Amino acid sequence: MEAKRLRKPGFREARRFDKRLMHLGKGLVMAQGSAPRRLVAGNWKMNGLSRSLVEVRALKSALAARALSTTIAVCPPATLLHQVSLELKGTPILVGGQDCHPEATGPFTGDISAEMLADAGASLVILGHSERRHGLHESDELIARKVSGAQRAGLVSILCIGETEAERDGGRTLDVVGRQITYSLPQAMDAGALVIAYEPVWAIGTGRVPSNSDIESVHGFVRERLKKRFGGDGADIAILYGGSVKPSNAGEILKLKEVGGALVGGASLKATDFLQIIDAA
Ligand code: PGA
């Protein structure tokens, strides 16, 4: 595939990767498998039927009129991934999956591989979400294998990390997120294929958010860990905040130090709410 100069401000970051460029229509390109420097991603979780495509269309037409300085992604359930990616073809809005199996193919009934997500139009995948870590007992080791699978398929991983309320109350927040960064990433990890999402478990879907200074201190800690692991490249990895991000608090959260965007659950389901968060970014 031929490399072209990037024309939209939201895709400046893709210049770092001139090997694997993916055409997004109308001359827009971005590096496949390369992570955006700023990202607002909507995690639909287990929500959405065919009729939810109206929200995607609304998002698409509203964003067509804006010059984006932040990359936007929608992560619908797997059943809608292909339809959403067809709907967004030719736009700079990316599509992501919400999980993948570590292997590419095989006897794993009900599972979906990173290659399948990519084939359906995804360029990102959320991995290690707390609803899977805690609800489905996913270990750091399993998550690292999934991140590896995503990398093999050319997908960017949005690796979720975050402490439970008990861990926070016990003063163990930094230990927990430090351990998750160390063990949920494979040995061979390309910093350019990684986004981190700090999502305190107790803030997800609860309407509660940490104080600004708590968010800054965890993000600062994560940044140091990433620099230690990846050297200079660790400075470029986007660290998103997630957990009850809403139109009313997005502006404040998104300007905090080391907050490179947001992973948005409930408020990403309605295009009108999601757009207000995108505007805040
Ligand atoms: P929430 O979810 O915005 O509904 O709190 C965030 C997430 O789980 O990614």
Image (tube, grey):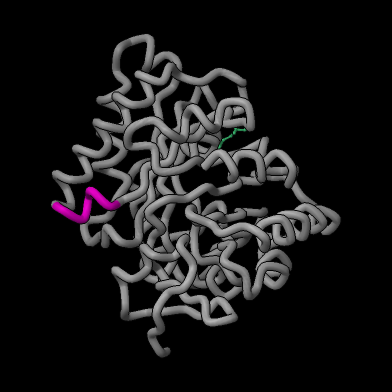
In which image quadrant can residue 175 be found? top left
Horizontal side, residue 189 vs residue 203: left or right: left
Closest to the observer: 17 or 251? 251
- Number of marks present in the image shown: 0
Residue at 39% from the left image edge and 60% from the top image edge: 35
Residue 129 % position (x, y):
49, 41
Q: Quadrant of ligand 1?
A: top right
Residue 74 % position (x, y):
61, 54
- Tell me if residue 241 comes above or below residue 36 in the rendering: above
Horizontal side, residue 269 vs residue 171: left or right: right
- Extreme-bottom residue of the structure: 2
Residue at 65% from the left image edge and 40% from the top image edge: 276
In which image quadrant can residue 65 be found? bottom right
Residue 188 % position (x, y):
22, 61
**Range of the magenta residues?**
232-236
Closest to the observer: 142 or 48? 48
Q: Quadrant of the N terminus?
A: bottom left
- Tell me if residue 265 comes above or below residue 253 in the rendering: below
- Extreme-top residue of the structure: 169
Residue 29 % position (x, y):
47, 76
Residue at 42% from the left image edge and 33% from the top image edge: 255
Magenta residue check for 61: no
The secondary structure that dominates the magenta segment is helix
Closest to the observer: 19 or 170? 19
- Tell me if residue 15 comes above or below residue 70 in the rendering: below
